[in-house]
Image (cartoon, grey):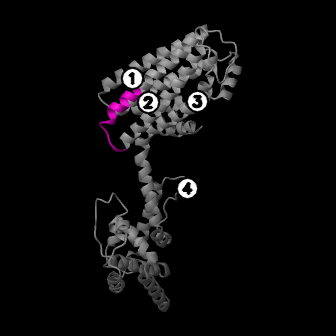
Amino acid sequence: MILLVTAVFKLSAMRGSWRDPLMAATGSVLLIGAFVCILSAPPTISVVNDLTGIANFSAPLVYSGMSALSACYLVLMITWRGGAPERIGHAARLIVGVYGLVIVGIVALFSLADVPVERTRDLDTYYAATPYMREMILLYLVSHTAATITLMRMCLSWLREVQNLTRQGLTLIVVGVMFDLSYQIAKYAAIAAHWNDRDWDFLSTSVSPPLVAIAGVTVAAGFALPRIGPPATDNFRAWRRHRLLEPLWAEMRDLRTPTSDTHWWDPPVVRLVQQEIAILDGVLVCSPYLDNEVRKTAHAVARAQLLTAADLQPSRTGADEQRTDHGTGSEKVVVDDAEIVAEAAMLAAAKVRASVNPSTGFPSDVGVLQCVEQPHLMVALAQALTSSPVVAVARQRAALQEVRHD
């Protein structure tokens, strides 16, 4: 079910992109994988058999789907690795042709087999010695094994050349392939035991299903990680920055120009953009009310407090690291903590004036706030707005002044 939901969302996002070989291979894997997962469930097997009126009709459907999925994994790996388009196209056509013949063989052999007894869980071992059905089962297993080994060789050869998420994704695929090979070994062992009048059916009915399930999830995760990992990392960083900027957003949101609302289903990167737009709009509204005298007074008080604190506790905290929250950390800007507090105090006082007397603004010579002009300092500005007693005093003084003016 998870794979089916993923397929629906992914395919809806891929509209118009089917000419891209990588996108086409990814979409095929999702569609066929979802199809196979649904058809291979025992309840679905019974329903399909009943609807067609043919005992075990689900068997060639599931085996054909698995063979097609094997081909799609190989094509996806070849396309993912890249290279000359002619070489990729030739290899993809060869794989599709070979596994197309395998599917034709599976259907033909099933049509020749006599399998009147429906088996939803142990078909492999129950019909392991039945003419034509035996060959169909072996054709599926051997072709699947060939695809699995080929996929592992491709991963191992490419693993030496890549790093980071691509290497981690390939490692996951190799781990998944190992589980898949274990599944196949269990199937082969159960069938061989049946040929020798031994009952090892538990290997096919109890051991194999969890192995192939783990293999499918791990291989899918390996292919998905390099494509999902970077957006997920960006969204995590956006969520963290969004949370840290909330005090500044709360201060400015009622002054901002109305913008499009965000929804709970919007990704963090979208929510962060809307939040920063609201902040910048609010700061723009406050700009005529910015007062350099407020900044100078706050700066002097904050600097004195910081110097006293430094004498009492020389070691620095992690504030500087938080101040560089935005970006990768490659750009390190050393900013006076007192200047950040001073700008926060000036902005808080300006917000009070803009809220109480919105029509009495006057031209300000302050210019653009440094903490707003440099986005990586906005987090420190947001923290100062809520945590600094200097800012609280400036806000209270501005409120008292506006009351007196009224």
The residue depicted at 37 percent of the width and 63 percent of the height is 325
Nearer the observer, 187 or 266? 187
Quarter of image, res 354: bottom left
Q: Secondary structure at mark 1?
A: helix
Q: Earlier in the sequence, mark 2 or mark 1?
A: 2
Mark closer to the chain start, 1 or 3: 1
Queried whether the magenta region covers residue 401, the answer comes back as no
Q: Earlier in the sequence, mark 4 or mark 2?
A: 2
Quote the CA–CA distance across marks 1 and 3.
33 Å
Does the magenta-highlighted stretch encompass residue 161?
yes
Q: Earlier in the sequence, mark 1 or mark 4?
A: 1
Determine crowd level at label 2: few under 14, some 14-19, many 20+ residues with C-alpha closer than 10 A.
many
Label number found at residue 92 = 1
Q: Quadrant of residue 204?
A: top right
- Residue 289 point in image, percent of width and height: 39, 79
**Mark 4 residue type:** Trp
Asked whether the beta carbons under mark 2 and mark 1 sit within 8 Å of each other, the answer is yes
